[in-house]
């Protein structure tokens, strides 16, 4: 009789343990994940991803990405299909480069720095030109995913990317005719 009660008690404890184990919430990721899917290995080997914290201006000088104060940008991926980076940010810009050929800049604004994102990219050449197309899907832990597709831009040997919406507003001028203000300006220093 005593053996039956011990077996029953062990089964109840095991059942309670299994209940709590399978009903626990998944642990939040400690990082954002960058993944290049369906991209040829020949392209992945030449891919690099750099990150800048809320930049107003970024310069590219002979294969070196840097901020306006000459601080080199942090590299988060170099020729591999997948990597991670810290999720603790609210506003960053990723610079995805393909060799000395093309680049794409992607501004990421997070409503909550505790939320982890999965950044899925696919890069493929257009059939009728040497232009590369980047197709991206940004998936947060919670909420809706964001999809985009765009051509990558030409990578000049020396140029500056200025984010106009982050600069101070110019003084009002009643004689000026205002049209659509560009989001960013690319100034080529050397072709």
Image: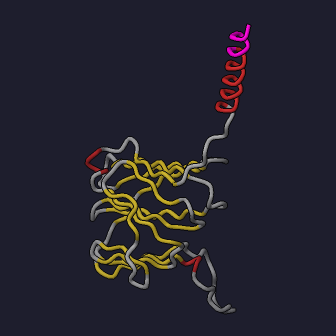
Please report the residue visible at 39 percent of the width from the left and 49 percent of the height from the top: 82
Tell me: residue 74, above or below residue 35. Answer: below
| Residue drawn where x is 56% and y is 52% of the image | 117
Nearest the viewer among 175 and 1 is 1
Picture quarter with the C terminus: bottom left
- Which residue is depicted at the point 52% across and 76% down? 163
Between 71 and 42, the one lying in front of the other is: 71
121 to 58, vertically: above or below:
above
Residue 174 lies, in percent from the top left, at: 69, 92
State the image quarter where residue 69 is shown: bottom left
What main secondary structure does the magenta stretch of the protein show?
helix
Vertical relation: 183 (above or below) 108: below
Determine whether, in the image, residue 124 is placed left or right of residue 176: left
Image quarter (top left, top right, bottom left or bottom right) of the N terminus: top right
**44 sits to left or right of 9:** left
Q: Which residues are magenta?
A: 1-7
* Residue 189 % position (x, y): 33, 82
**Place of residue 128 in the rendered image (x, y in percent of width and height, measured from the top left):** 31, 49
């Amino acid at each position: 009789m005593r053996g039956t009660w011990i077996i029953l008690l062990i089964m109840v404890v095991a059942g309670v343990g299994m209940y709590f184990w399978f009903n626990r919430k998944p642990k939040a990721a400690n990082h954002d994940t960058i993944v290049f899917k369906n991209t040829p290995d020949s392209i992945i080997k030449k891919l690099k991803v750099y990150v800048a914290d809320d930049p107003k201006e970024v310069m590219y000088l002979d294969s070196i990405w840097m901020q306006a104060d000459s601080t080199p940008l942090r590299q988060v991926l170099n020729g591999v299909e997948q990597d991670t980076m810290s999720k603790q940010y609210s506003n960053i810009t990723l610079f995805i480069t393909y060799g000395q050929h093309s680049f794409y800049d992607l501004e990421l604004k997070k409503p909550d720095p505790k939320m982890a994102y999965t950044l899925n990219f696919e890069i493929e050449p257009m059939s009728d030109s040497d232009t590369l197309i980047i197709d991206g899907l940004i998936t947060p832990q919670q909420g809706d995913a964001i999809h985009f597709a765009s051509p990558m831009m030409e990578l000049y040997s020396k140029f500056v990317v200025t984010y106009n919406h982050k600069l101070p507003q110019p003084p009002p001028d009643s004689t000026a005719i205002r049209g659509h203000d560009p989001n960013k300006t690319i100034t080529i220093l050397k072709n």
